[in-house]
Image (cartoon, rainbow, N blue to C red):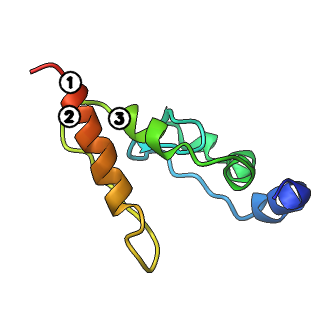
Amino acid sequence: MKQIGSEYEHCISSHIEYEQEMLPFCSSVTSNTITDPRKLDASYWRQNLESPVLFTEAIQSLPTSGTPVFLEVGPHSALAAPLRQILRTLATKSPV
């Protein structure tokens, strides 16, 4: 995907718009929580295209308080089983 990364970034850059506020977004690109919508620029989406998915790391970096919401966009819930497995592992590691 790196071969087309530059062209992809160029093509989407004029279509990205930002809102003033956003819900915290846990990135599977960086495994960090993003709270500034300006960080979701064309460069970020290029990195998303070119980089390995850090799904486990992103889930592990979620805050432990509250109830997170997981949204998988696609025709099949392909990530449901891995998500359950990661959460089970985290539950066994957390102190009682």
Q: Which residue is mark 2?
A: 91
- Mark 3 is surrounded, within 10 Å at the Cα level, by few (under 14), some (14 to 19) or many (20 or more) other residues, namely some
Few, some or many C-alpha atoms within 10 Å of disc 2 (few <14, some 14-19, many ≥20)?
few
Q: Residue at x 41, y 64 (%)?
A: 72
In the displayed orientation, state which residue is furthest to the bottom. Answer: 75
Q: Farthest residue to the top: give it.
A: 95
- How far, Cα to Cα, is label 3 from label 1? 14 Å
In the rendered image, which quarter is residue 71 located in? bottom left
Q: Nearer the viewer, residue 1 or 16?
A: 1
Q: Position of residue 36 (x, y in %)?
A: 52, 37
Which of the two discs, 3 and 1, labels the residue nearer the N terminus? 3
Q: Amino acid at mark 2?
A: Ala
Amino acid under disc 3: Leu
Mark closer to the chain start, 2 or 3: 3
For the residues labelled 2 and 1, say whether their Cβ atoms are less than 8 Å apart: yes
Q: Is residue 77 left or right of residue 9?
A: left
The residue positioned 15% from the left and 19% from the top of the image is 95
Q: Which residue is mark 1?
A: 94
Disc 1 residue type (three-letter): Ser
